[in-house]
Image (cartoon, rainbow, N blue to C red):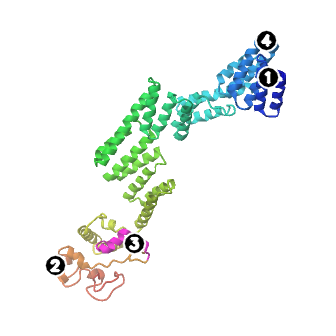
Amino acid sequence: MTAEDYKAQGNAFYKSGNYSKAIDGYTSAIEADLNNPIYRGNRSMAYMQLGMYSNALEDCRKALELSEGVEEYTSNIPKTLLRIGKIQTALGQYEEAKETFSKISPSPSSADVQPAYDMSRYMSQAEAMVSAGNCGLALHSLNGAEKLLGLNVVAPRKWRLLKCECLISTGEYEQAASVAVNLLREDKQDSDALVLRGRVLYAQGENQLAASHFMEALRVDPDHKQARELLKRSREIEKKKNDGNDAFKRGNLQAALDLYTGALKVDESNKGTNSKLYSNRATVYMRLGKFEDAVSDCDAALELDPNYIKARRTKGRALGKLERFEEALQEFQKALEADPSDSNIRAEIQEMELEVKKSKRKDYYKILGISKSADDMEIKKAYRKMALLYHPDKNPDDPAAQEKFKDVGEAYEILSDSQKRARYDSGVDLQDPNGMYGGAGGMSAEVDPSVLFQMFGGAGGANGFPPEFMHQFGGSAGGSPFGAQFGGAGGGNRRGQPRGFSSGFYTY
């Protein structure tokens, strides 16, 4: 078969869409006649259909070389130049394409050259946006340029380096890592790609791995300034973080606090490490009992990393300590949404749900003005103080004081009894609506006033009460100090008397 026969065979395959077979036909034609640029031009078109633009460009350049100075093929030169410009555009070589188009006479149509100019505009915009610190818009422009590339064409290295830079700045670390890793697969000694991969790791808080990439970049290029600066920074921040962790483990909380604070000042842009540092410092604040500070640091950690479950759980615990139970419950629920398999979070949710329910009933500790760890003496002392403060004889015609007086009695009845107090603290009543004080309205106070007076240390007056106490509350010798309040020294129960009253005394 002649070269023309092979060409005809290639043309038939091309028309049928069998571009691989077409390439075989044109290759046979080229081998039969090495000086005919038409065969190479035809093969370049088949290469383009398969997305093999580099091969196509090589064929076109050879065809142009064979056509120059040969009158028979001179008319083929503009067509070959146009094809070269389109291939260069498809490969992302827009500046070269624009130069190639400028050599064509007459000038090619705007439809043929517009993609190269659009690509140039997109890339100029992207570079300008990066310089202005607006990497989000830069990514938009880069995506526009990439859409103009040819089939299966990988973006030029310069584009990918710029894109990786933008992805790191916008916090798209997984995508940035993918770009950097692909560049390193092409060239393991690409110092710029090594630095970018290190920056991704650094931003994710993986300082030791980041440092290893910066060191490798410096081994390849000892003058790489950014790699040197980042290596120093990653080592410094990691050391302070580790020193803070060691101080915390030793129980030296102030030293841990200072070290974490110092580490946070090393690089405010390091979101990955700083989120961990804020979380660690929040844990220190928890141990110091500074729960508001702990919440603040957890908020800072979550602002840097909204998916940081540890910080969210610490925030929930701190809010619980501040008795902001509903807010705490919300934090634990968000943590569970992020990690539904964690049974510990479910346990914390159950615990906080109980605290929310407990917070909606009367808080006997607050009524008496004592802490939940108060002992019996503190409870008695607080009861004496509050009972005197709100006693109806001291607050005549004051329904609010009377209600508070009843609450004080309820509180003392529960908290002075170890079993009742244990049930109250555990929230058993909330589990059992029929329990002793599970109802929404609480209970009636049934406290023997003698308990109150015994706490005053009085023993000798009427009915065992000190005379000065009788006088203070309007009682008379031989009568009840509550006679005036509750209907005299004797007689049956009157309307408004607390349940269990008899002859002016509480039964207990």
Cα distance between the residues tagged 4 and 2: 133 Å
User: Where residue 294 sits: x, y (%)?
Assistant: 37, 50
Q: Nearer the viewer, residue 109 or 14?
A: 14
Q: Nearer the viewer, residue 71 or 313?
A: 71
Dot in front, 1 or 2:
1
Dot in front, 4 or 3:
4
Dot in front, 4 or 2:
4
Q: Is residue 103 above or below residue 217?
A: above
Residue 70 numbered mark, or none: 4
Identify the element where label 4 is drawn.
loop
Callout 4: few (<14), some (14-19), or many (20+) C-alpha neighbours within 10 Å?
A: few
Dot in front, 4 or 1:
1
Mark 2 sits on what residue?
A: 459
Magenta-colored stretch includes residue 226? no
Q: Which residues are magenta?
A: 412-433
Dot in front, 3 or 2:
3
Cα distance between the residues tagged 1 and 3: 93 Å
Cα distance between the residues tagged 3 and 2: 38 Å
* Type of amino acid under label 4: Val
Q: Visible in this render: residue 431?
A: yes
Decide which of tag 4 and tag 3 comes sooner along the chain.
4
Mark 3 sits on what residue?
A: 428
Q: Quadrant of residue 88?
A: top right
Mark 1 sits on what residue?
A: 29
